[in-house]
Image (tube, helix red, strand yellow):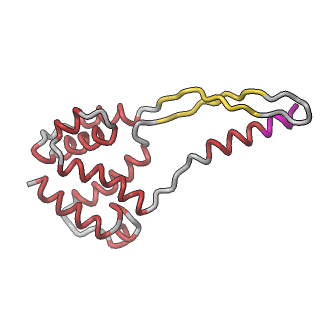
């Protein structure tokens, strides 16, 4: 019976770990579309949207006062807190039995987010570089912050237009 329990735990652990994602520069470029929307779409239109990424973009616009949006860090933090709040639900997995032993169900709590806090940190790293007046460190751009140097330059141009 202990062997069945351990194999069930291994299966569930494998399923949980298979959901892990590595953020490559391509994935970071995809995350930077949120910044691009914050720089180009009016804040009230973003905030009215039901899409989590648009509401995240609205919080960015409010935090930095982009595109004529009022500078309101309290509201930006409230929007971001709702988006990154964990939602836990129970998921059931069937673990089949071996050698004529019946299988059983394993219930596992799964935590999901509208916006993953790690993705928020990646976007915040890019925003830190964009809001800085100086030239960003080349190592940061080569490491894929903002999706690479070319994408950074494009976002920096949009940033300049949105903040003036």
State the residue at coordinates (91%, 35%).
Answer: 99
Quarter where residue 85 is shown? top left
Residue at 22% across / 35% down in the picture?
47
Q: Is the magenta stretch mostly helix, strand or loop?
A: helix
Q: Is residue 5 magenta?
A: yes
**Which quadrant of the rendered structure holds the C terminus?**
bottom left
Residue 122 lies, in percent from the top left, at 38, 53
* 159 is higher (above) or lower (below) than 68: below
Q: Is residue 76 left or right of residue 120?
A: left
Q: Which range of residues does the magenta coloring cover?
A: 1-7
Image quadrant in which you'd find residue 92: top right
Quarter of the image for residue 143 reads bottom left
Q: Position of residue 24 (x, y in %)?
A: 45, 61
Q: Please provide percent x and percent y for residue 13.
A: 68, 42
Location of residue 104 with respect to 155 vertically, above or below: above
Image side of residue 64 versus residue 152, left or right: left
């Amino acid at each position: 019976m202990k062997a069945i329990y351990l194999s069930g735990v291994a299966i569930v652990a494998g399923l949980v770990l298979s959901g892990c994602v590595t953020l490559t520069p391509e994935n970071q470029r995809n995350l930077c579309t949120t910044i691009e929307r914050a720089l180009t779409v009016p804040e009230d239109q973003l905030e009215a949207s039901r899409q989590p990424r648009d509401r995240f973009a609205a919080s960015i616009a409010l935090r930095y006062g982009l595109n004529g949006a009022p500078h309101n860090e309290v509201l930006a933090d409230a929007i971001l807190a709702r988006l990154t709040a964990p939602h836990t639900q129970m998921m059931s997995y069937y673990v089949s039995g071996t050698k004529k032993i019946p299988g059983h169900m394993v219930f596992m709590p799964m935590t999901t987010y509208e916006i993953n806090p790690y993705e928020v940190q990646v976007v915040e790293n890019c925003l830190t570089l964009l809001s800085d007046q100086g030239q960003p460190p080349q190592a940061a751009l080569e490491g894929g912050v903002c999706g690479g140097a070319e994408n950074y330059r494009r976002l920096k141009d949009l940033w300049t237009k949105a903040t003036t």
